[in-house]
């Protein structure tokens, strides 16, 4: 969750994990996606009441759960699906967006500051273009709002044409793979923690 539910319950985070795992598999093409729980440490006993309650539930769930993941490891690919509540997810998302924007701005400033730097930038350009593409939200189109009756892809407020096209591509895959029905069936089987 990157902002929809600020005060999630443990069973809801399990549902997020199930939905995210199915989305990663059916729409993004991951085979048996890994699921991590965003936390302040990798050890099992770490975190606040919510993450401590969710950890054993995720271990029990029929998921490829890899344990707690620290924020510093998120961009290194520590897991395919990262589970957190909306408050934490939104803070992480905005921090990553801000860091990426600052890095690109600083790099541009340095690469244009002298002739030597401009020559270096020209040599590095293919790699920098690939890197920028990986970090560009427009490549992904938007984030799915999972668990709704119909497919919804939430696009960034400053989305351009390419971002909108990619959001439509994601929504099309979502529909073609019948992700909503698959999620609904899976959630009926995974009721861990709902009585809490």
Image (spheres, rainbow, N blue to C red):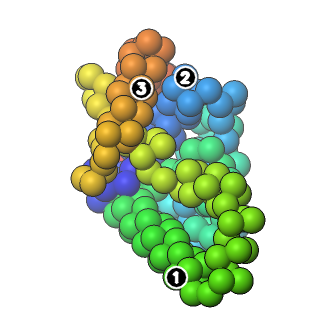
Q: Nearer the viewer, residue 80 or 186?
A: 80
User: On the picture, is 121 further left or further right than 132?
Assistant: right
Q: Tag 1 or tag 3, which sits nearer the N-term?
A: 1
Q: Tag 2 or tag 1, which sits nearer the N-term?
A: 2
User: On the picture, is 54 further left or further right than 63?
Assistant: left
Residue 171 picture location, percent across and down: 37, 25
Determine whether the residue tagged by mark 2 lies in a helix, strand or loop.
helix
Q: Are marks 1 and 2 in contact (CB under 8 Å)?
A: no
Quarter occupied by residue 15:
top left
Residue 172 picture location, percent across and down: 39, 19
Mark 3 Cα-neighbour bin, 10 Å: few <14, some 14–19, many ≥20: some
Cα distance in 3D space between marks 3 and 1: 34 Å
User: On the picture, is 168 further left or further right than 36?
Assistant: left
In the image, which disc is placed on residue 109? Answer: 1
Residue 156 picture location, percent across and down: 31, 50
- Residue occupying image coordinates x 67% and y 71%: 121
In the image, which disc is placed on residue 26? Answer: 2
């Amino acid at each position: 969750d990157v902002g929809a539910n600020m005060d999630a319950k443990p069973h809801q985070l399990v549902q997020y994990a199930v939905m995210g795992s199915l989305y990663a598999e059916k729409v993004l093409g991951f085979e048996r996606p890994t699921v991590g729980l965003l936390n302040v440490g990798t050890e099992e006993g770490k975190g606040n009441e919510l993450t401590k309650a969710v950890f054993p539930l995720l271990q029990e769930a029929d998921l490829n759960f890899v344990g707690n993941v620290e924020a510093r490891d998120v961009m290194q690919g520590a897991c395919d699906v990262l589970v957190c509540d909306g408050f934490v997810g939104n803070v992480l998302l905005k921090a990553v967006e801000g860091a990426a924007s600052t890095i690109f701005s600083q790099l541009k400033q340095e690469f244009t500051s002298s002739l030597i730097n401009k020559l270096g930038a020209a040599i590095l350009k293919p790699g920098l273009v690939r890197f920028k593409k990986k970090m560009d939200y427009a490549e992904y189109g938007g984030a799915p709002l999972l668990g709704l009756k119909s497919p919804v892809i939430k696009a960034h407020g400053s989305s351009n044409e390419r971002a909108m096209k990619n959001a439509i591509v994601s929504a099309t895959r979502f529909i073609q793979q019948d992700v909503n029905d698959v999620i609904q069936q899976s959630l009926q089987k995974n009721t861990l923690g709902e009585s809490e």
